[in-house]
Image (cartoon, rainbow, N blue to C red):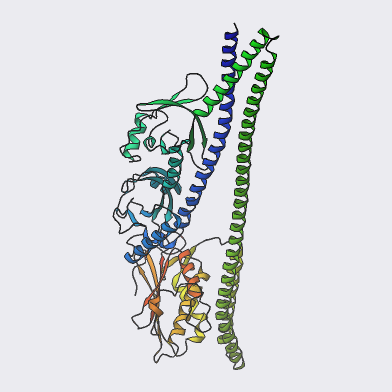
Amino acid sequence: MSLAAVLAAAIVAGRIAERAALADLRRSANSTLALQVAAFRTEMQKQGSLPLALASDPEIAAVVGASPDPALIARVDDRLAEIARASGAAVIYVIRRDGTAVAASNAGEPGSFVGAVYAFRPYFQQALAEGAGRQFALGTVSGRPGLYLSRRVAGPDGRTGVVVVKVEFDAIEDAWRDSWTKGGETVMVTDPRGIVLMASEPAWRFGTMRPVPDEERRLIRERLEFGAAPLSPLPLYPSSDGSGLVRVGSGAQPARLALPLDAPIPGTTWRLHTLTRIGVAVARERVQAQVIAGLAVGLACLGLAEIVGRRRRLRDSLAEAAARRTELEERVRARTQALTEANQKLKAEIAERRRAEADRQRLGRELAHAGRLAALGQFAASMAHEINQPLAAIRSYADNAGILIQRGRLPEAAENLSAVGRLTERIAGLTRQLKGFARKASGRRDPVALVSVVRASLEVVEGRLSGIDLALALPEPSPYVLGEGPRLEQVVVNLVQNALDAVAGAKNPRIAVTVRVTGERAVLEVGDNGGGLPDGGGQVFDAFFTTKANGLGLGLAISRGIVEDSGGTLSAGASPEGGALFRVDLPLAPAGAGGPPASTGAAA
C-alpha cells in the first residue's frame, strides 16, 4: 500500500511539474516569438518605402516611355546598382507595360534581368492595376527566393510601367539556422496558403502546413512562384494527449516533441511560426518532481510506521526535501526574473520604436512644410521677374501716350492707353497665379488661340524689338490648344525675352517666331542667331541655372512646368539661324471643346 501511494504521488507530481515547466516554456517561447516578429518586421520596413521613392524619379519614369535614350537607360542602370548596394536590396529593375525589363541594377552582369519578360508575375499585374504590389517567389533568372515589392511608374508620354525591388532574407535565415543548429527554436514564415517561404531548417523551405488544392498548385506552377518545389507537407503531427504539442519527424530519426506558436507579421499577410523543443528541461523537471514527491510520501509512510524509533531520520529526510524544494523555487524565481527582464526589454524596444515613428512623422511634416515654403518663394521670385516685363511696357506706353496727347494725336494715344489696360490685366493675371499657388491650382484647361497668345506676348516686349529683324510665321485661322491663356503668354514672353538677350550685341540680330500644325499637335518655335546654348543646353531648364549676370534662372524651369501642365513639351536645341531654338509642342483642342476643329492642316 505504501508503494502504491509513492507511485501515485510521483505520477501526480510529475504531471504537475511538467505542466508548470511547459507553462514557463510557453511564456519564454512567446517572448522569443515577439522578438522574432519585431526583428523580421524591422527588416521589411527597411525596404518598404524604396519602391515608392523610385517610382517618383523622373529618369526612371522616362525609361518606360516609347524609345528611351540608350544613354538614359545606362544612367538608370548605374543608379539602380548604386541604390541596390546602399540599401541592401538583391536587385532593382524597371519593367515596361508589356512586361519587359528595360533597366536593372544587374545590367551587364551574367544573369541580367534586362530583356526578361515578367508580365505573368502577380506583383507586376497588381502594381499596374492597383498602384502597388508584392509577391514572394523564386527568381526566374537567378533561381533565388525573395520578396518582390513593386510600384507603378507613370511615364512622361502617358505610358506606364513598374519598378520592382527584390529583397532577400539570407541574413535572417542564416541567423535562424545558426540558432537552430545549436539547439534553439525552429523558425519559419508562411503565407496565407500555409506554404513555408523561409525556414531555419533548409529542407522545410516551400513545404506546406496544410494540403494545397490542385487548382492552387496549377496557378503556382503557371506563375513560377516556387520553381519545381513539390510543396510537400511538413513532418508535423499533433500530439495525441491534447496538450497542444506536436511531434516533429525527420526521416529515420525518432520524432521529437515541440511547442508550436505563431503570430501575424504586421503589415503583411504572413505568419511567423516557432517550434520550441520539449526536451531535457521538461523531463528533468518532471523527474525531479517525481523524486521529491516519492521521497516525501515514502518518508511520510516510513515515519508513520516507525514514528517511535526513526523520528530523527524522518527529520533529516524532511530537511533534505525542503532543501530540494528551496532549490527548485530558486530556479523558478531565476527563470521568472529572466522572463521579466526580457519582457521589460521588449517593452522598452516597443516604446523606442514608437518614439522613432513619431519623430519620423514629425520630420516628414516639417520637410513637407519647408518644401512648400521653398516652392512658394521660388514662384514669388519668378512672378516678380515676370511682372517687371509688363511694367516696363506700361511705362513705355504711358510715356508715348503723353507725347501723343500733347501732339493732339488722340486716336493713337487711346490705342496706347488700351495697351496699358491689357498689360494691367496681364499683371493682375500674374498676381492671381501667385495667390492661386498659395491656395492650390484648379488645373482647368480651356481652348486658347495660339496665334492670339503669341501676338499678346509680343505686345509685352514690343519696346525691345526696335532694331530687331522679327520674322513671324503665324497661320490664319489660328490653331486652338488647351491651356490657360495668361500662363501660355508667360511662356512665350519668357522665350522671346531670352532670344532678345541672346541677340544683344549681334551684328544683324534676328528672331524667328513660327506657329504650325503637325498632325494632332500645334508647334510653336522661337529661334535666334545669338551665341547658342551653353554645353548643348543640358542645364537650361534647371531651376536657378542662368548665364545672365542679373538673371534668376527661373524662367525656363517655370515655362517647362506650364507647358507640361497643358499636356505638352518644351525642348531646346540649335537654331538654323545659328543660335538657340526653343520648341513648344502642345495638343490641339478637340473639336466641340469651344474652338475650331482639332485638325487645321499644316502651316509654315
The image shows residue 587 at horizontal and vertical percentages of: 41, 64
Camera-side residue: 444 or 279? 279
In the rendered image, residue 598, in percent from the top left (x then y), is placed at: 39, 63
Count up the numbered dots. Answer: 0
Image quadrant for the C terminus? bottom left
Which residue is situated farthest in the top direction here?
1
Return the x and y of residue 395 as percentages of the image width and height. 59, 85
Vertical order, 567 against 309 (above or below): below
At 41% across and 88% down in the image, what residue appears?
509
Residue lying at the far bottom in this picture: please name it.
407
Q: Is residue 159 left or right of residue 436?
A: left
Depth check: 306 or 117 in front? 306
Q: Is residue 513 visible?
A: no
Q: Residue visible at 63% across and 51% down?
A: 355
Image: 517 above or below 53? below
Whether residue 557 is situated above or below residue 270 in the rendered picture: below
- Quarter of the rendering occupied by the N terminus: top right
Instruction: Say above or below: 167 vs 186.
Output: below
- Give the residue at x 59% y 25%: 20
- Residue 438 % position (x, y): 61, 64
